[in-house]
Image: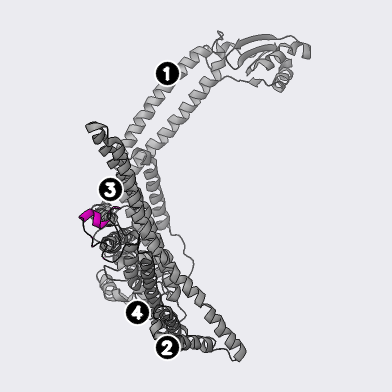
Amino acid sequence: MIVPMKRLTLIGLSCEKESTLKALQRLGAVQLISEGELTDSEKLRQLTAKADRLNAARRAIKPYYKKPMLSPTPQCTEAQLEAIQPEGDALCQSIEKLEAEQAEKRAELERLAALRAQLEPFREMLTPLEAIHSTKYIAYILGTADAKVMDAVDNVEAALDTHIGLEAYPNENLTAVVIACNRDERDAILRYVKDAGFNEFIPPKLTGTASENMEKAAKQMDATEAELYRIASELTAAAEKRSRLDMAADAYAIEKQRAEGETALKSTQYAYILDGWARADKLDEIQLAVSSVTDAYYIETRDPYADENPPTATKNKKLIEPFEVITEMYALPSYRGIDAAAVMAPFYFLFFGMMLSDFGYGMLLFIGGLLFTRFLKPKGDTAKLVKVITYGGLSTMLCAPFIGTFFGVEWNDLFNTTVFPLLFDPMTDVMQMMLLSCGLGIVHMYTGIIVKMYMCFRDGDPQSAIFDQLSWMLLLTGLILLFAAPAIKTVSLVLIILGGGMLLLFSGRSIKNPVMRLGKGLSALYNITGYLSDILSYVRIFALGLVSGAMGMVFNLIGGMVYDALGGLGIIGIVIGFILAAALLIALHMFSLFINTLGAFAHTARLQFIEFFGKFYEADGVKFKPLAMNTDTVNVIDSGAE
């Protein structure tokens, strides 16, 4: 059901604003409203900066932290979150220092590697680098060139009509070149050889030969790599304390949310005014939360005005609540609409089981879902989604004896009986299964029409309920009976004429022009094609159920062929064949489980979204976002937030 909302106004003392917001945040039942643009406060900026630093530190240690694939969500109290903040700050500062040192060492390593690469062509040069420096009359040019450029260097004297000294040190790909020339001619010579592909090398201020400096750089690189290894070890040790960073980040996130809420208040030096949307079922708890921290306050609530659009919050029984995640995948219901979760849940449960239809697959989903929830403790939409899949596994186990298999094995082969399936075999009784699927689809669609009729009566529009909704039920029922039960043809024709006549005459009842009104009625009747195509869409229930069983049978056949192929090779062949066949069957059935579960989930949802929701669902709701203990990595177990 959609929870009624109240517009709430709370007035209190500015000195008690923080404690009041904290109490409301624990409850998680009030969404704050800001009349104007939110402005950052100094407190909010500081909290944002702290949260950003912690998140940056978490990203820095992520490569050094291997989180178990199926680790449970940690639980802690609000007091534990607040107490961990100083430790988280200290750890964050330590990680920042290590990260800065690591960046410095990496830059040093890159510089040394680049230096070695630059000196590599001059490895064979025996002249110390400090001796190669220009004087008042002589200039030195160092660089590298390929074989073609060397020809140009050899000819530079003739080209520029000058005299130069040249030393070359051939390497595998490049040749290192040292040119000694008249200082006044240096620039001209350099331009000439550069045009020919010469790359100048300006050596840093080093002493010793290139080879000696390369060895020195190599030793420095080893030392730097050792430092990087030490830093990585310390980051790995810090990563073992990642949970403290996570908790501290969540603690600051909670404070930040409260500070953001504070910017929405209208405040003076002595008092503040809080405007918001409050859950009507939590008003007493809101009153109690505020009174627990202050005696000086004033609360006023009222119903939403007709032109206001309150946020949407839903509340359902525990069995229905998980299916809220399916409706929210489509869109939130309008505040003044209908929460479809309760009416959709039985159909989703049934259709999922019929589509998967294999007892073994359903058993794995059901047990896996229970274990996942028990040990990993998911929260929010993830927890709801896991429960939907768990319910789907239970539904599959219930449906399988009637129309399905057990890991692709037929029940009669499994138990040596002739009574299964209890309803009929989709592999052979194709028409019966198709009729069952379409029949369930008709019930599904009629339920949607009935819900829409209820909405029309609720909103004081009985004409729409009768002429736009009941008329379709009469017409469709008449058409179905006409083909399914020829013996009551008269009843069928009466229903067809009654339903079709209501659509023809009253679909355009707001139009005064009789011709246009009749045209509107004819247009409405044309929608019969849409209803018929919707009914045929439910054949996918049969199709997916058939695929699940067929895939399992084929995979069993493949496993049997592998076993038979090796079973004739003696006892060793039997053992190897059994191991290979078992491994192959496990892999194939796990693939089948995944792909068929995905198909059942998606196609069952599609039947709700298109064929069902299209009949009544108003999907323009705005999500209710209360001030609450919203965390990313931990569950706050002492919070009253929902």
Q: Give the residues drawn in magenta, as a range.
A: 406-422
**Tag 4, which secondary structure?**
strand
Q: Which of marks 4 and 2 is in front?
A: 2
Which label's residue is closer to the chain start, 2 or 1?
1
Question: How far apart are the alpha carbons under marks 3 and 1?
Answer: 43 Å
Mark 4 surroundings: few (<14), some (14-19) or many (≥20) residues within 10 A:
few
Q: Is residue 60 above or below residue 387?
A: above
Q: Pinpoint residue 621: horizontal percent, then vertical percent.
A: 43, 71
- Return the residue nearer the eye: 585 or 205: 585
Magenta span includes 61: no
Q: Pinpoint residue 561: horizontal percent, then vertical percent.
A: 32, 42
Which label's residue is closer to the chain start, 2 or 3?
3
Q: Which of marks 2 and 3 is in front?
A: 2
Q: In which quarter of the image is the N terminus?
A: bottom left
Q: Which amino acid does label 3 sit on?
A: Ser
Question: How far apart are the alpha carbons under marks 4 and 1?
Answer: 76 Å
Q: Which amino acid does label 2 sit on?
A: Thr
- At a point 59% along the width and 91% down the height, the residue shown is 512
Q: Is residue 533 left or right of residue 582?
A: right
Mark 1 surroundings: few (<14), some (14-19) or many (≥20) residues within 10 A:
few
Mark 3 surroundings: few (<14), some (14-19) or many (≥20) residues within 10 A:
few
Residue wearing tag 4: 300
**Which numbered dot is residue 490?**
2
Residue wearing tag 3: 71
Which label's residue is closer to the chain start, 4 or 2?
4
Residue wearing tag 1: 219
Which label's residue is closer to the chain start, 3 or 1?
3
Q: Is residue 402 left or right of residue 174?
A: left
Quarter of the image where one finds residue 345: bottom left
Q: What residue type is labelled 4?
A: Glu
Q: Nearer the viewer, mark 3 or mark 1?
A: 3
